[in-house]
Image: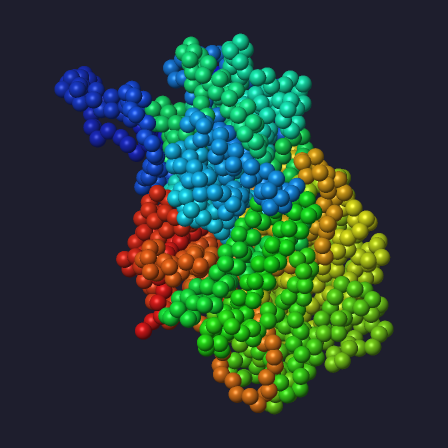
Amino acid sequence: MSLSSYLGSNTRRGGGWAQSLLPSSSPTVKSTLKVHPTRKSRKRTVLINFLLTNFFTIALSLSFIFFILTLFFFGIPKPISSHLQPPSSTRRLTTRKPVTRKQPWLNPNQTGAAVDITTKDLYDKIEFLDKPGGAWTQGWKVSYKGDEWDSEKLKIFVVPHSHNDPGWKFTVEEYYQRQSRLILDTVVHTLSKDRRRKFIWEEMSYLERWWRDASEDKRETFTNLVKNGQLEIVGGGWVMNDEANSHYFAIIEQITEGNMWLNDTIGFVPKNSWAIDPFGYSPTMAYLFRRMGFENMLIQRTHYELKKELAWNKNLEYVWRQSWDANETTDIFVHMMPFYSYDIPHTCGPEPAICCQFDFARSHGFSYELCPWGQYPVETNPENVQERALKLLDQYRKKSTLYRTNTLLVPLGDDFRYVTAEEAEAQFRNYQMIFDYINSTPSLNAEAKFGTLDDYFQTLREEADRINYSVPREIGSGQISGFPSLSGDFFTYADRQKDYWSGYYVSRPFFKAVDRVLEQTLRASEMLMAFLLGHCQRPQCEKLPMRYAYKLMAARRNLALFQHHDGVTGTAKDHVVLDYGTRMHTSLQDLQIFMSKAIEVLLGIRQEKYDQTPALFDPEQVRSKYDALPMHRAISARKGTVQSVVLFNPLEQTREEVVMVVVSRPDVSVLDSNWTCVQSQVSPELQHDESKIFTGRHRIHWKASIPAMGLQTYYIANGFAGCEKAKPAKLKFSSKLSSGPCLAPYACSKVEGDTVEIVNRRQVLTFDVKHGLLQKVIHKNGLQNVVVEEIALYSSSGGAYLFLPDGDAQPIIKSGGNLVISEGPLMQEVYSYPKTSWEKTPVSHSTRIYNGGNTVQDFLIEKEYHVELLGKDFNDRELIVRYKTDTNNKRIFYSDLNGFQMSRRETYDKIPLQGNYYPMPSLAFMQGSNGQRFSIHSRQALGAASLKEGWLEIMLDRRLVRDDGRGLGQGVMDNRVMNVVFHILMESNISSTSDPVSNPLPLSPSLLSHRVNAQLNYPLHAFIAKKPQEISAPTHSRSFSPLAAPLPCDLHIVSFKVPRPSKYSQQQQQLVDPRLVLMLHRRNWDSSYCKKARSQCTAVADESVNLFNMFKDLTVLNARATSLNLLHDDTEMLGYTEQFGDVARDGRVIIPPMEIQAYKFELRPRQ
């Protein structure tokens, strides 16, 4: 097929902004000459004289207009001589002033990016017919005319690489010992023999491990290879992270951990990312990389039909722009690989049977799989080099026709390749002989050589500077000319037929939950470490933080390791999952011990600030082993004693909410830090056991108030005179349980009727008694919502990666389960142990509402599902909860990407059910045409779908017997007992809102929704005194309030930490970088919903925040802006606005919505 036969149109819908340059045809523009109708000859004479007199002026004006129109449609021509200029050895992103373009299809009250392509448009256009394409199964028969390279030769960069998974079939240490250390040894040895040889490396987890073992000679050689450009570190994160389940905090952590180690050790800072194996791609990564100083990205695993559409129109290379970015500040250049896989058969060209012949490691004598097409590699020699070179060049040429430029990237590698010197020599030797032939034959108009990713992108950019590849009316980008702009994400990934990779959104959900617990515990620990060192003036007080500096670094790296695309995805073998889980569990224990000791120092209890004695506090929740649910530590509360409970608030706003601890006896009272009585309620602790639903312990609830990023102490007392004891909840039982004796000290009654209600000041929840499921919600303003809860199972034939349902999910709840209703002044709860077809039901659940008095909790519904998908009865089953509402959402919903931004999701009939499932790391919501919203907030990554009008379903767990053919070699059968918690929010808009159907842009959460999500994902950390004290013993008020004032409600502290805690004192002596970092994110919120978030929200970040005045007892010094990986202080190269870099002058922090900004500074105690 000729090149021109598949060049498609690349124009935007709705016309372009070019029309503004055309002459106006407005009827209001009229001549001011008034001529009498009978004087035509005089008028003609005057006109002729005018034209003759002003001939040159008119001609010049017309020429100028023609010139402007030519520039607009065809771009600015490049100087002919520009290709003669020597190429620069380094390249910096060109920067420009922010541009605001009006997008024709946006409503006036909507703002967003003007782009050439959106992934929504692609989904709307593509028919998803999976038509066979011949040798390139998922494409077409690619051909070329032969003259495409006459004026600009084909420049081929073959990039050797080895993809090293930090855990998959083997643990990270097993892989290191078996393969990765040998690969790095081979690379150092082989590249040193010939300067023409190149290589790229991605994972710092392996490089750091190798560095510890390597000799000084190997280290020096490695460093020299990096410096001379033979070896490039791409990405440079600790791992190549997953992009569906990972939270943006953890992504920033893992990239920063790798990048900082690399810079500290070798002095190299990456600028090109390489993500060949994540199962779908998020624009969050593009944003983060841009703000870290990266210039280019490479991606691979996107839906095969999207690849085909983009390749057909030569749009596989594009500029990725964030959907909200009207000023082009987030633009980053992206190369998408065109074919099925990143292995050698699918990277040299469209015909894998031919490409496989050039994977010389598949020759006999090596351990790799032979070519499955029956044609094998042949050693290149002088007799066959012409034939082999022309055959390979034909593939290169065909591949190049899918891209705009004549600069071609050809990866050369696979999983764990280049293990031995013999293997590496086979590749380098054969390819170099082929390159020598191509390069010595001018008539081929081609030049081939080994290259790095930077070699490729630098040459491509230089070619794009010389030759205009822009398509008429293409918006493109100011960063690089000649390529389209694109916004959107690439979920859900399908690699062939109807095989959609939506199963890994939920696989191993227990460990997805542990991941987030470690994340928020690490964040809290980093804060406490920063406060300890910030308040420290003498070397003695550094002993505690210094002792835990190594464990803090280990926790960062264990969290980072789990972000690997076979870690948090749940797609590793069982023993590898055990390894990940054990690492996270160890770090959780270490961090909790550190926090227990840190709070003593900050509260002034441990005055000596040493680490000699055991901690006085224990964490309120404890895990007995890596795969066990956390258990609440019970307070004994003996008569005449009090026991301290310290609460740490890791959020940046004052927090008022109803909190809970477990006590061994119900006759207790709650006191605040001033020993003032606090209203409390007590209710029985429940468990997932039909024969013994009550544990014998009790839950005590009270309303607590904790300062922003601060500590507050409360006391659980037994026998404190003048204090009312906790009020016992009233209990109601279903008929099955009502026959037993009532628990003391509670009043018990039997549930009457077919429905039961629980009520707080904001809403009334109605439940079906027979099934124990939610039915409807009535709001106190009179609005009523149908919310029919359904628990169901899919039958499935998928595996760890693939969700392959056999039909729709079938409800499993039958009539006749057990129901316990607890009613109290602070918390009301419906606990349901439902009846199912199995002797032990796989799920029980609680629904709670709170009465805190104008707290965020008052507006939400808390759902907690206890899941036990264990045993052969549930083989090949996938458990969901489905909420059937009266929201007319047209099967459109919104789910978050990495906890950072939202994405619009639409259910398509042309895509199978599994393709309409999407990742939900923390939030999904539906919105009706009347503006009513139904939101589900989660504290762990799961999968979500809206398969019918008003439905929103979340998958809770999955148990699959089979391997799904993607290399793992096993199913997912190691299910753990787990709890899944949702916070459900129903809101009505207070002003006009956009219609989800007509608006293609993602909607933003409300301010209240952001606050609900923050409190769920960054919960209070509770610590209990190990020993009770006598009521008569005197005590002081114990609290810690570090901020001068709470931050605005839409400003979130992503992290506040000491990046190099083990070098804290050393850095001070060396007078290098400031030693603390504050990273802030301004959340974007939908202003058509209540602005003040209805509770305790007095300010938003429309006004600047002053960094110098942020802390109460600490002075900020030497403040400067920095990149998100903390390695670039030149903020202009990061795409930020000019004000960002001005913080050092006046301390003012101005953050536009959606932006994340980082600041380095020093802290000193105020004098």
One can see residue 1151 in this view: yes
Give the colour scheme of this rendering: rainbow
Residue at image x 50%, y 58%? 550
Tell me: 58 left or right of 24.
left
One can see residue 517 in this view: no
Compared with 287, 57 (above or below) is above
Tell me: 207 left or right of 888.
left
Residue 767: percent from the left, percent from the top?
Answer: 73, 62
Image quadrant containing the C terminus? bottom left
Compared with 524, 570 (above or below) is above
Image quadrant containing the N terminus? top right
Q: Which quadrant of the view contains residue 716?
A: bottom right
Compared with 968, 705 (above or below) is below
Tell me: 534 left or right of 774.
left
Between 1084 and 1015, the one nearer to me in the picture: 1015
Residue 976: percent from the left, percent from the top?
Answer: 72, 54
Residue at image x 85%, y 73%? 739
